[in-house]
Image (spheres, rainbow, N blue to C red):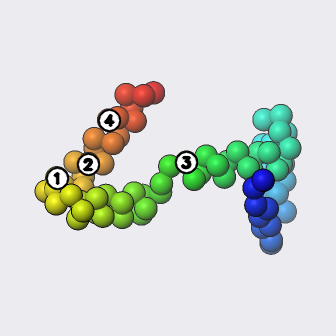
Amino acid sequence: MGTSITIRDVPDETHAELRSRAALAGQSLQEYLRSHLIELTSKPDMKTLMARIHEWKKQTGTNVPVNTILADLDAIRNDGE
């Protein structure tokens, strides 16, 4: 079983909008937020991605510039769409 998360002090307007989006998606608020949290963590954010690339470059000793690696990753992602 997973872990529960409690988020406090969510503005009323934000809560209402999230409930509305969940309803439009045919989901409960919990289902809607859970699916979006899973999606959010399925891909690293830019800061994490950059740290991983720098670590990989350090470990492998490659001289490939980070922007080239990122461009290649973008190309790979776009080919899958």
Badges 1 and 2: C-beta atoms under 8 Å apart?
A: yes
Residue 42 - label:
3
User: N-terminal of the two: label 1 or label 2?
Assistant: 1
Residue type at the position of mark 3: Ser
C-alpha separation, residue under disc 2 versus residue under disc 4: 10 Å
Residue at 42%, 28% (x, y): give it: 80
Q: Is residue 10 left or right of residue 60?
A: right
Residue 64 - label:
1
Question: Counting other residues with Cα less than 10 Å from the Cα at mark 1, is it few (<14), some (14-19), or many (20 or more)?
Answer: few
**From the viewer's perspective, is the residue at label 4 or at label 1 nearer?**
1
Q: Nearer the viewer, residue 17 or 65?
A: 65
Badges 3 and 2: C-beta atoms under 8 Å apart?
A: no
Q: Which residue is mark 4?
A: 75
User: N-terminal of the two: label 1 or label 3?
Assistant: 3
Residue at 70%, 45% (x, y): give it: 35
User: N-terminal of the two: label 2 or label 4?
Assistant: 2
Residue type at the position of mark 1: Val
| Quadrant hosting residue 7 | bottom right
Residue type at the position of mark 4: Ala
Q: Is residue 37 left or right of residue 75?
A: right
C-alpha separation, residue under disc 3 versus residue under disc 2: 19 Å
Q: Residue 78: percent from the left, percent from the top?
A: 39, 32
